[in-house]
Image (cartoon, grey):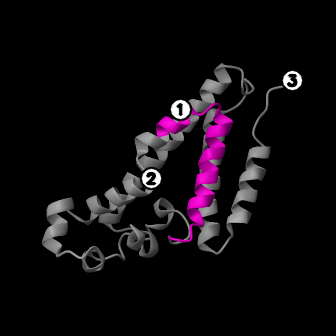
């Protein structure tokens, strides 16, 4: 996972992967089929499971809590001491080969799925009157994900955890509120 995170999908070779894993290429192919499947398994490990994330969003007390939890998790994950800076999903692709396009689409589908879960949670808050009726769930969810992607870039450029958590606070201060 860290190789893909540090060097990107395409720049990480089968030789690099098998060396770090302490296996021979036939073992990698027998276990994962190909590099793409190994990468997608690494993404699932990184995420802790897509279903778990979607469930956590759905079960959050409010959409505000769900959004804040996603943003804080991104800030903490982007600045871990034991991993490369930034987000694996955001920083692992830099090329445009046909193989990379398939991986890029897989990552985009994961991001869309998480964003859809957040959008559904926001829509629920709108229906329940927790958020103003004029709130735009698609734009709010998109804003959270734009900030998550931006924080990943900032972390790769050396931004501190303190700075990223400050950004989270600023974003959440602008979260829509119902009138008292």
User: Could one spot residue 95 in this view of the protein?
Assistant: no
In front: 92, or 66?
66
Mark closest to the chain's N terminus, 3 or 2: 2
Residue drawn at (76%, 51%), measured in percent from left and top?
Answer: 169
Q: Is residue 19 above or below residue 42?
A: below
Q: Answer few, some or many: residues within 10 Å of disc 2's Cα (few below 14, many 20 plus, some between 14 and 19).
A: some
Q: Answer few, some or many: residues within 10 Å of disc 1's Cα (few below 14, many 20 plus, some between 14 and 19).
A: some
Query: Which quadrant would residue 2 be assigned to in this image?
Result: bottom left
Query: Which quadrant would residue 37 be assigned to in this image?
Result: bottom left
Asked if marks 1 and 3 touch (Cβ < 8 Å), the reply is: no
Q: Position of residue 4 (x, y in %)?
A: 39, 70
Q: Which residue is mark 2?
A: 47
- Label 3 sits on a secondary structure element that is loop
Q: Answer few, some or many: residues within 10 Å of disc 3's Cα (few below 14, many 20 plus, some between 14 and 19).
A: few
Q: Position of residue 70 (x, y in %)?
A: 59, 47
Disc 2 to disc 1, how far (Cα)? 16 Å
Q: Quadrant of the C terminus?
A: top right
**Magenta span: helix, strand or loop, mainly?**
helix
Tag shown at residue 6? none
Q: Is residue 51 magenta?
A: no
Query: Which quadrant would residue 157 be assigned to in this image?
Result: bottom right
Q: Which residue is mark 1?
A: 58
Drawn side of residue 39 relative to residue 48, left or right: left
Q: Which residue is mark 3?
A: 180
Residue drawn at (67%, 33%), measured in percent from left and top?
Answer: 136
Residue drawn at (66%, 45%), measured in percent from left and top?
Answer: 68
Q: Is residue 60 magenta?
A: yes
Drawn side of residue 35 relative to residue 145, left or right: left
The magenta span reads 54-82
């Amino acid at each position: 996972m860290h190789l893909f995170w540090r060097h990107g999908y395409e720049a990480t070779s089968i030789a690099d992967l098998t060396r770090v894993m302490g296996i021979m290429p036939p073992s990698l192919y027998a276990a994962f089929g190909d590099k793409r499947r190994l990468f997608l398994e690494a993404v699932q490990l990184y995420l802790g499971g897509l279903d778990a994330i979607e469930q956590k969003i759905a079960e959050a007390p409010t959409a505000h809590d769900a959004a804040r939890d996603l943003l804080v998790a991104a800030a903490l994950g982007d600045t871990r001491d034991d991993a490369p800076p930034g987000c694996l999903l955001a920083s692992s692709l830099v090329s445009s080969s046909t193989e990379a396009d398939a991986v890029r689409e897989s990552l985009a589908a994961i991001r869309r799925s998480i964003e859809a879960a957040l959008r559904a949670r926001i829509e629920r808050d709108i229906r329940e009157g927790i958020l103003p009726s004029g709130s735009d769930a698609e734009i709010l969810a998109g804003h959270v994900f734009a900030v998550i992607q931006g924080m990943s870039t900032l972390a790769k450029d050396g931004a501190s955890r303190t700075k990223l958590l400050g950004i989270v606070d600023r974003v959440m201060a602008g979260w829509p509120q119902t009138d008292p």
